[in-house]
Image (spheres, grey):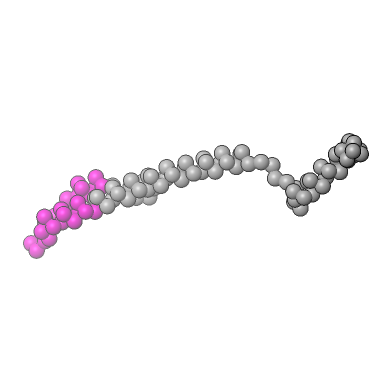
């Protein structure tokens, strides 16, 4: 799944410690930015999970509907052809009794 491909988690970002230098960044600015990244990361992760669940649901629904589909008519067979064959069958079985 996606967790195998992602190298960082929101927790990894939260717990990351940076060394400070003489002219380093303001710790407060870095923390605010990392907080934004963590929120986005969690949102993306949740969206991916939701989409994977929906994908599974739709695959199952497709599988179930494909099992329930009626048997297709042979190629070239129309409703008119079926009605004509049925009429001929009735004539053969019942003869002229239908038209009396």
- Picture coordinates of residue 95 (x, y %)? 91, 38
Q: Residue furthest left?
A: 22
Picture quadrant of residue 100: top right
Quadrant of the rendering where the N terminus is positioned = top left
Left or right of 39: which side holds 97?
right
Which secondary structure dominates the residues rendered in magenta? helix
- Picture coordinates of residue 66 (x, y %)? 60, 42
In the image, residue 99 lies in the stretch drawn in magenta:
no
Left or right of 100: which side holds 45?
left
> Does residue 8 appear in the picture of this structure?
no
**In the depicted view, which residue is nearer to us: 69 or 22?**
69
**Residue at position x 24%, y 45% from top?**
11
**In the depicted view, which residue is nearer to us: 19 or 50?**
50
> Does residue 48 appear in the picture of this structure?
yes
Left or right of 63: which side holds 17?
left
Q: Which residue lies furthest to the right in this view?
A: 96
- Picture coordinates of residue 78 (x, y %)? 75, 50
**The residue stretch that appears in magenta:** 10-37
Q: 98 above or below 29?
A: above
**Residue at position x 33%, y 47% from top?**
45
**Residue at position x 49%, y 44% from top?**
58
**In the depicted view, which residue is nearer to us: 93 or 35?**
93
**Residue at position x 79%, y 49% from top?**
81
- Picture coordinates of residue 32 (x, y %)? 16, 54
């Amino acid at each position: 799944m996606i967790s195998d491909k992602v190298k960082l988690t929101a927790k990894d970002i939260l717990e990351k410690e940076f060394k400070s230098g003489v002219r380093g960044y303001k710790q407060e600015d870095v923390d605010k930015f990392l907080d934004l990244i963590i929120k986005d990361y969690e949102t993306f992760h949740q969206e991916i999970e939701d989409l994977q669940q929906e994908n599974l649901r739709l695959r199952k629904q497709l599988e179930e509907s494909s099992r329930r589909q009626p048997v297709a008519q042979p190629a070239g067979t129309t409703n008119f052809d079926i009605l004509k064959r049925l009429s001929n069958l009735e004539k053969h079985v019942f003869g002229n009794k239908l038209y009396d």
